Image (cartoon, rainbow, N blue to C red):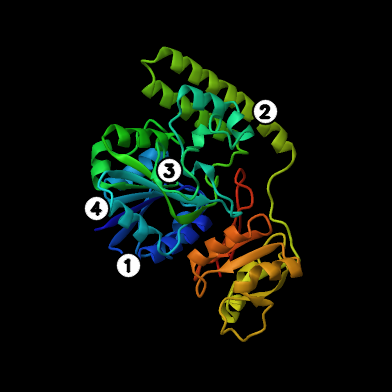
């Protein structure tokens, strides 16, 4: 077995559906296994997913054991030369996993690898590469100075600013949303520390991979979508409890013998938590993220696929008004507003506010490329071939949106 893909699910069945469709395509030419652990979801994930993906191994927990423990549960069954820990709210391009494995095979000291990530609006996610939370970087990050001065090599050092967005290189911390390890690194570290219920477990594992003598690499030659915050929204007060509690656990674990640094880092964590809670209080007053009805949503699909996805879109609440179709191939002679190769002028001329991509004739890789080209100009929805849902996310700090067929359809 070349690769084991491990995914932990918690109440995000529609996002996981899209994720699994993309992972299956990315594994088409790899001897791979996909292991999903569900942490006692209450959204009907078991009934919805198990029948749709008979070739995937599911494990259904009777309680929410936390992210680290659930991953380790699947890790005990994994047999691949490489192990990928992947979030359920991600979409990977078709050549992603092959590229990552090739990178490993050309760098014997590579113990863990992360890739370039974009959010659901097409923008680069800075957390694709990070530095260890030293006393200074922790203080800057937790107090908000990093967000205030995102380009500063000093205050934004948390995001490994010594490496450019499109440049491969050695980094300290890789994101748990996409973290591929060699079998040797897995054996040396034993997987995640189960004391971390959620958050900071990726920082801890990245730290221990390096302590074991391996190197962590940021690899931007493939880009994935990470919708962000689906299992736990930053608008949920529980987020702050888990996140800042996890950061406190990390610094106490690794900096206990450095009293001054430990004090400064705890001070930064305390300040960060209070500021974040204050920010959340004001954000909550602005209302929750909702799907907005749009009279200018265009579907990027072949004509037959367009007809199929309309069956799902009609269940959108509030309703979506579809204003046309964008053809995927030059050979498409059916009625369309234009071709995908000319999508930007179409969006501008027709004042399109949203694109709904239909994977099939259209690859996940192409979808991701177009999202980056049009970031900031339109919002995006994605439908995987044969899926019963459509998903999207326009705000990385809030839960995403979905449209789905009723259970009896």
Dot 3 or dot 4, earlier in sequence: 4
The residue that disc 2 covers is 278
Q: In the visual, does 72 lie left or right of 316?
A: left
Please provide percent x and percent y for residue 367. Answer: 54, 64
Mark 1 surroundings within 10 Å by alpha-carbon count, few (fewer than 14), some (14 through 19), many (20 or more): few
Helix or strand or loop: what does disc 2 sit on?
helix
Horizontal side of 90 relative to 380 (left or right) equals: left
In three-dimensional space, the C-alpha distance between marks 2 and 4, rounded to whole angstroms, equals 46 Å
Q: Give the mark nearer the N terminus: 1 vs 2.
A: 1
Residue corresponding to mark 1: 29
The answer to which of marks 2 and 4 sits earlier in the sequence is 4
Residue 403 in which image quadrant: bottom right
Q: Secondary structure at mark 3?
A: loop
Q: Nearer the viewer, residue 400 or 95?
A: 95
Task: Name the residue carrying label 3.
Answer: 176
Task: Confirm or deny contact between disc 1 and disc 3 (CB under 8 A).
Answer: no
Distance from Cα at disc 1 to Cα at disc 3: 24 Å
Callout 2 environment at 10 Å: few (<14), some (14 to 19), or many (20+)? few
Residue found 60% across the figure and 60% down from its top: 373
- The residue tagged 4 is 79
Q: Residue at x 42, y 27 (%)?
A: 250
Helix, strand or loop at label 1? It is loop
Q: Earlier in the sequence, mark 1 or mark 3?
A: 1
> Cα distance, mark 3 to mark 2?
27 Å
How far separated are the C-alphas under marks 3 and 4?
Answer: 20 Å
Would you place residue 293 above or below residue 283 in this image? below
In the rendered image, is residue 374 in sight?
A: yes
Residue sticking out furthest to the bottom:
333
Q: Nearer the viewer, residue 126 or 194?
A: 126
């Amino acid at each position: 077995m070349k690769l084991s893909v491990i995914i932990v699910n918690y109440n995000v069945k529609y996002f996981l559906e899209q994720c699994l469709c993309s992972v299956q395509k990315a594994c088409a030419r790899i001897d791979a296994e996909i292991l999903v652990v569900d942490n006692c979801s209450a959204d009907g994930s078991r009934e919805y997913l198990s029948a749709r993906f008979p070739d995937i191994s599911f494990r259904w927990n009777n309680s929410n054991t936390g992210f680290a423990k659930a991953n380790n549960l699947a890790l005990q069954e994994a047999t691949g030369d490489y192990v990928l820990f992947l979030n359920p709210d991600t979409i990977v391009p078709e050549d992603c996993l092959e590229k990552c494995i090739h990178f490993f095979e050309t760098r014997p000291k590579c113990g863990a690898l992360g890739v370039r990530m974009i959010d659901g609006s097409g923008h680069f996610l800075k957390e694709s590469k990070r530095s260890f939370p030293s006393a200074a970087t922790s203080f800057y990050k937790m107090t908000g100075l990093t967000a205030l001065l995102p380009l500063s090599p000093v205050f934004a050092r948390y995001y490994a600013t010594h490496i450019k967005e499109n440049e491969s290189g050695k980094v300290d911390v890789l994101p748990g949303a996409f973290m591929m390890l060699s079998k040797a690194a897995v054996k040396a570290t034993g997987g995640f520390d189960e004391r971390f219920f959620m958050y900071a477990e990726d920082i801890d594992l990245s730290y221990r991979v390096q302590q074991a003598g391996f190197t962590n690499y940021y690899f931007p030659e493939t880009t994935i979508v990470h919708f962000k915050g689906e299992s736990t929204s930053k608008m949920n007060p529980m987020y702050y409890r888990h996140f800042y509690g996890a950061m406190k656990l990390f610094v106490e674990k690794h900096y206990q013998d450095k009293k001054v640094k430990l004090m400064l880092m705890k001070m930064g964590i305390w300040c960060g938590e209070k500021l974040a809670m204050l920010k959340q209080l004001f954000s909550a007053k602005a209302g929750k993220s909702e799907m907005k009805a749009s009279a200018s949503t265009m579907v990027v699909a072949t004509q037959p696929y367009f007809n199929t996805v309309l069956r799902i879109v009609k269940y959108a609440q509030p309703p979506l008004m579809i204003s046309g179709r964008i053809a995927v191939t030059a050979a498409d002679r059916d009625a369309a507003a234009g071709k995908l190769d000319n999508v930007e002028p179409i969006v501008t001329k027709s004042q399109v506010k949203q694109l709904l991509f239909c994977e099939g004739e259209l690859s996940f890789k192409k979808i991701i490329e177009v999202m980056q080209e049009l970031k900031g100009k339109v919002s995006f929805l994605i439908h995987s071939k044969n899926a019963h849902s459509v998903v999207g996310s326009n705000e990385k700090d809030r839960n995403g949106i979905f449209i789905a067929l009723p259970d009896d359809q």
